[in-house]
Image (cartoon, rainbow, N blue to C red):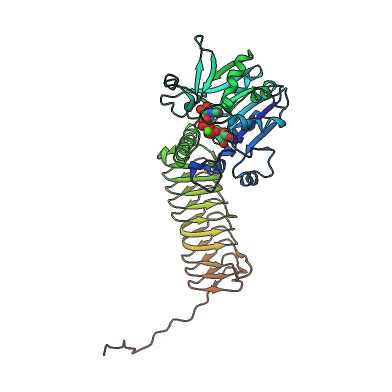
Amino acid sequence: MNNAHTTPLYVVVLAAGQGKRMNSALPKVLQPLAAKPLLEHVLQAAQPLDPDKVIVVYGHGGEAVQACFEGRKLTWAHQAEQKGTGHALAQALPHLSAQGIVLVLYGDVPLLQTHTLEQLIQPARDALVLLTQQIPEPGGYGRILRDEQRRVVGIREEKDASPQEKQIQEVNTGIMAMPAVHLSKWLERLTCANAQGEYYLTDIVASAVADGVAVRAVQPAHDWEALGVNDKRQLAQLEAIWQRQQAESLLCRGVTLADPERLTVRGTVTCGRDVMLDVGVILEGDVTLEEGVSIGPYCVLRNCTIGAGTVVHAYTHIEGARLGPDNRVGPYARIRPGTITQQAVHLGNFVEVKNCTIDQATKANHLTYLGDSSLGARVNVGAGTITCNYDGVNKHRTQIGDDVFIGSDTQLVAPVTVESGATIGAGSTIVRTAPAAQLTLSRSRQQTIPHWKRPLKK
Ligand code: UD1
Ligand code: CA
């Protein structure tokens, strides 16, 4: 099925470990990195390889893991007891066919790049291929053993290593690929006669050497790719690396970042040229920023499109909205789902907009709530205007025509229509249609009491 090779490809993700050191009720592989579970990152790196099957070996918190990936094309293999990585891979054996290539990934190694995985599976048709890495402080990792000809002959786990072997700086990342045809016999030969009493997958290297199967080592393109997550500190480190990569990618696409260290991306960003992002911006879900968009400090944008040349000022939240070109939004505006604006719309400070269509050049500059409304072009919404869209049971719409002027502190009690060119006097409560091109107001008359005196203190 996969186009890189005619041999079937099986991806096995080992994800049964408990992750005790996370100190969390959430299974380790569901911990979020850039708002997505660790396991999701692993699956997304493998997906472009077009594998014939993806088998997830699960154990701890299994139901939660399966529920999180419900409806996905995954094969689940249960490892009831965690008896080591070799034992874990053995649980996937019933799902493999002998002709295939097997790629072993870890559910808690989320930053691997597809390119690196390709390097691993290409030679794996007739060799056992290990992803190894030089690490100055290799403590904790399995060490790669090589003979005088520099051929890989084995992997020694830290706990089983001699002081001399502990000096070795080339480590096993755990990621490997091999022809499926050898796997079941190699796994059968594993014993748990080692310091941890576990079935080490790493021991298959010695088997490959004994069977005359070549063992190769390839290295990841970046030294951070094979980093694993065991605790919240490492999770934070990987998050920082991931975010740095997002920032790099935006910079390469011509985005100006006030500070690449102070941008957070939790999704996919599509960007035009000359976009500017100030510090503390958070972009979530699918965000499109067209050419020349400027986003001020500490804005949160989720699943939205911002039209060319639009300026979003500080501390603004935008979700599920599509803003037109040359809009001015914020500071401190909240634009909620279902909002669609045309050109040159202004939504100022403390303005909340939900499920509204707003035509060009319309302005609501201060302290306003617009909900379930359609506003025509060139409308001026005065400060403190509220659409009363909710009667406690149902939501109702407010229709505002072109060139309407709404005086400050107006309540529009929906369902209600303000026709084109109407003017609403400040302080009005509008409950019926305000006719076109006329002044409508509802306001008790101002009076002055003559000769009135303030009471005096007794
Ligand atoms: C393993 C390697 C070691 C390597 C290191 C890299 C072995 C014996 N050792 O060690 O050479 O340097 O990874 O991080 O393979 N898992 C299961 N079931 C189990 C045990 C583990 O599914 O019974 C999964 C874990 O969820 C995890 C992965 O396998 O995703 C690795 O397990 P872990 O215990 O972290 O491996 P290490 O002992 O650190
Ligand atoms: Ca272990």
Work out which residue is located at the far top of the displayed protein and give it.
Answer: 149
Q: Nearer the viewer, residue 53 or 292?
A: 53
Residue sticking out furthest to the left? 458
**Residue 111 in sight:** no
Q: Residue at x 58, y 18 (%)?
A: 206
Q: Which quadrant contains ligand 1?
A: top right
Report the label total. 0
In percent of the image, x 41 and y 26: which residue is there?
A: 137
Residue at the image point whose x is 44% and y is 40% from the top = 233
- For residue 419, side relative to residue 453 (left or right): right
Q: Is residue 153 above or below residue 97?
A: above
Q: Foreground residue, 431 or 2?
A: 2
Q: Position of residue 300 (x, y in %)?
A: 49, 49
Q: Where, quadrant-wise, is the N terminus in this rendering?
A: top right
The percent coordinates of residue 124 (x first, y second) are 63, 20
Residue at the image point whose x is 55% and y is 64% from the top: 404
- Image height check: is 362 above or below 309? below
Examine the rendered structure and indicate whether residue 240 appears above or below residue 126: below
The percent coordinates of residue 151 (x first, y second) are 54, 13
Q: Quadrant of residue 399?
A: bottom right
Depth check, front residue: 52 or 392: 52
Q: Is residue 360 visible?
A: yes
Question: Which sits in the foreground, 269 or 358?
Answer: 269
* Quarter of the figure with the C terminus: bottom left
In screen coordinates, is 88 left or right of 349?
right
Q: Percent from the top left, x then y, of residue 376?
A: 58, 59
